[in-house]
Every structure is written in C-alpha cells, then in structure tokens.
Amino acid sequence: MSKTIAVFGATGNQGGSVLRSLVERDCYHLKAVTRNINSQKAKDFSHLKNVTLAEADLDNKESVDIVLKGCYGAFLVTDFTSHFVKNREVEQGVNFIDKAIANNVKHIVFSGLENIESQIHEPCLHFDYKAAIEDYGIKQKDKIHFTSVRMPMYYQEVVGSVFNKAFGNRFLLNIPMDKEKIVYLMNVDDIGNCVASVFDHPELYKSQIIELCGDYMKVQDLVILLNQELSPLKVYFPGGSFNRFLFKYILKFPGVNDIRVMFDYFNYFNHQIKRDSDITKKLNPDVVNFSTWLKKNRTQIISNKTA
C-alpha cells in the first residue's frame, strides 16, 4: 500500500516543486493541500496521478487535523509575509506538529531557516519564526521524525525583486551586501527532488537540519555573470553602502525592515552562514547552477525586464 504524504502549500513555489517531484516517484499517494481547492492552480494538479486535492488552512486546527489523518508524512511551508502578524507563524507551525503527532504521522519535512536575532541582535521575523518551529520540531524526536530543509535566496528572486530597472536597458542589482561577500543561491524548483529524497530515506535524515545550495559566488561575480548571460541588458552594482541606505531610509513596503536585517546578517555574518552544495547534489543530482538556469530562462527574463 502506498504511503500518503500531505504537501501543504501545494500551489506555491516550494510546495508545487515538492508535489511534482513526489508524483514522479510514483510510490506515494499525495494530498495536494491548499486553502482553496477551487483555484486554477489547484485544479491544475487534479489530473496528476495519485494526487488528491485537499483543503486546509494553517490557522484552522480542525482542517489540518482532518487532512493529516492517515498520512505517513507531510511537507510544511509557512509564510510570515502573507500576513505579517507577530507569533502567528510559530503558532501555525507548533499546532501543525502537534496535530501530526496526534495523527501518528511518521515524518515531517519543514522549510525552515536559521535564527538571525540571536546573532545580529535585531529581529528578522520571517527567519526567526521558522527557526522556532525548527527547534520545536527537532525536540519532538521521540514522537516524530522531523527534518528541516533551509533554502537560500532563489534564482528567481535575483532576477526579480532585487534586480531593478534604472533606465533603458540599464539595471541595478540592489543587494545590500559588500561586493566581496558570498551570496548563496538556488532554483526554487530544485527543492522538490531534495525533499523527495528526504522522504525516501527517513532514517538517514531524521532530526536533521539540511542547508541547501544550488550555487554560490561573490556579489561582484554575480554582477559579471548577469551581464554575461543577459546581454544586451546592462547590470550595475551601486555598492553595498548605497543599497543598505536604500533599504534603511528610502524603500517603503511591508516587511522591508525584515529584509534589511536579513541582508545585514548575510553581509556582516557572511563567514558563519552554512549552505551545503555537496549534500544538495546528493539529494538532487540534477540541481542546476545559476549560469545554466540563466541560459535556459534568458529569453523570458529579458522579456519580463524590458516589458
């Protein structure tokens, strides 16, 4: 009999990748869990083999309880930026773990992150809350297998939110880090095979925090690569100090201070950051580097940026 795995956030970037990879395994029954099973994204999954749509909201304990019944495993991704409510993300994660234990779920794979406040002494809630969920899950090791996979910055984010038009074909890379610092990156679509491998080998990866990484390079080399692969676009790096000023005093959007603190951590604690390309390749031998991804998506990226 196939093991059942519930994939929460199935219509999102991470959840969708995990669902597609588990479908390809052809050895699991899958619950594609979303808050709205009538959305087009949810309906797109309905034709996939061994996939059942399920509706649940992490704020609704009863709906989570219903979905987890009969499941062997579950993938959980939480999102502070969808609501910006203090402590809500932690409550969602802790409640989820408790419901999983109550339903005799054997293995949770969680999309986690490290605690930043303990190192930089400023809160970075979308990191710190995930770290609190990680900590709680690992402590339940006598009751459930719990694995956290930590994603770095997505390739999609580099060519999206921190890659901004100046004028004409000239763009600014607004990463508030110094040019010699290392930035860790990964294609969000590659998380799926990593998580699937963790589910395939629970004894090997239980009670572990796995630091994922598809590629890494200095900020100055990132600028060179973007110019090489996205010509005729011209990409300029105005400098870490300018970008830090931008994030601290100029930019105004929900969560901007969280992003500022995150990049301060990436910059000033760069030597402490742990991301492991070797274990990533072990979990997903097909993980692509940033250059390959840029080549594959070059036409679409240029079209989006010059529209």
Image (cartoon, rainbow, N blue to C red):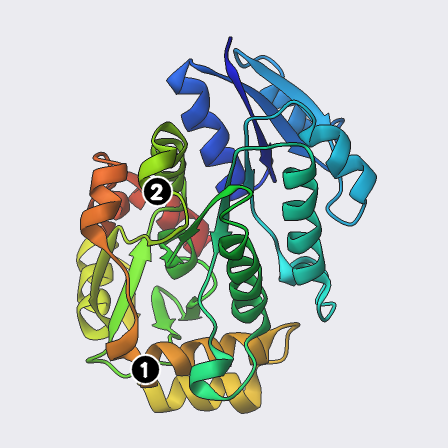
Which residue was labeled with disc 2?
A: 205
x 73%, y 62%: residue:
88
The reply to whether residue 137 is visible in this rendering is yes
x 39%, y 19%: residue:
24
| Amino acid tagged 2 | Tyr
Q: Is residue 122 above or below residue 174?
A: below
Q: Give how far across and how far down residue 183 sits, in percent.
A: 28, 68
State left or right for residue 11 relative to residue 218: right
Q: Give how far across and how far down residue 18 sits, in percent.
A: 46, 34
State left or right for residue 204 relative to residue 116: left
Whichever of labels 2 and 1 marks the residue nearer the N terminus, that label is 2
Which is more toward the observer, 143 or 100? 143
* Residue 42: quadrant of the picture: top right
Which residue was labeled with disc 1?
A: 269
| Amino acid tagged 1 | Phe
For residue 68, the mark is: none
Q: CA distance from mark 2 to mark 1?
A: 27 Å
Q: Give how far across and how far down residue 126 sits, in percent.
A: 57, 67
Q: Is residue 14 above or below residue 270?
A: above
Mark 1: which secondary structure?
loop
Which is more toward the observer, 57 or 247? 57
